[in-house]
Amino acid sequence: MSCPDDFEFLLGVPTLAEVWQQHARLLEEECHELREEVRALKAERRKLVQLYARSQKELGESQRRAEELQRELNRKSVEYTLLHNRIAYPYSYGDHAAMTKERLSKLESNN
């Protein structure tokens, strides 16, 4: 009994063309999956870019506010120092004429 040349294919062994077709279908499915992943990653990247832009804006506003508060603190510190010196050293600031004896005694008792 002789075996025909296509005997193996009668047993369910795929031809080379069928193997390549199957491989092409698998690659096509993988490409579709990868496209979906790329779309999802692009959407996530857009969200991250928006979050970064928003956080940079908030950071800039916070820095400007911090600078304003620092300037205010500096002004208040200068005012406090001037007031403290004026109270502690009234004669240096020419306030001795306006000071009453009671006020002078209070200041001296506090020091």
Image (cartoon, helix red, strand yellow):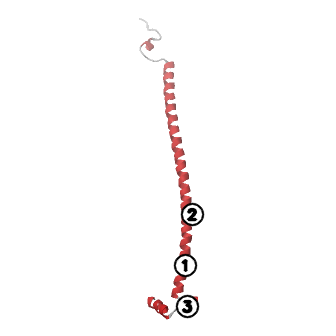
Q: Residue at point 56% right, 67% down? A: 68
Q: Residue shown at 54%/45% (left/top)?
A: 46
Q: According to the image, label 3 marks what residue?
A: 98
**Tag 1: Cα neighbours inside 10 Å, few (<14), some, or many (≥20)?**
few
Judged from the image, the secondary structure of the residue bearing numbered disc 3 is loop
Q: CA distance from mark 3 to mark 2?
A: 42 Å
| Residue for badge 1 | 79
Question: Where's residue 90, x and y in %?
Answer: 54, 89
Q: CA distance from mark 1 to mark 3?
A: 20 Å
Q: Nearer the viewer, mark 1 or mark 3?
A: 3
Q: Is residue 46 above or below residue 84?
A: above
**Which type of secondary structure does the marked residue at label 1 adopt?**
helix
Question: Which callout, 1 or 2, points at the residue further toward the start of the chain?
Answer: 2
Q: Nearer the viewer, residue 55 or 100?
A: 100
Labels 3 and 2: the sequence-earlier one:
2
Disc 1 + disc 2, Cβ < 8 Å = no
Q: Residue furthest bottom?
A: 101
Residue 17 — which label?
none
Viewer-proximal residue among 5 and 106: 106
Residue that numbered label 2 is attached to: 64
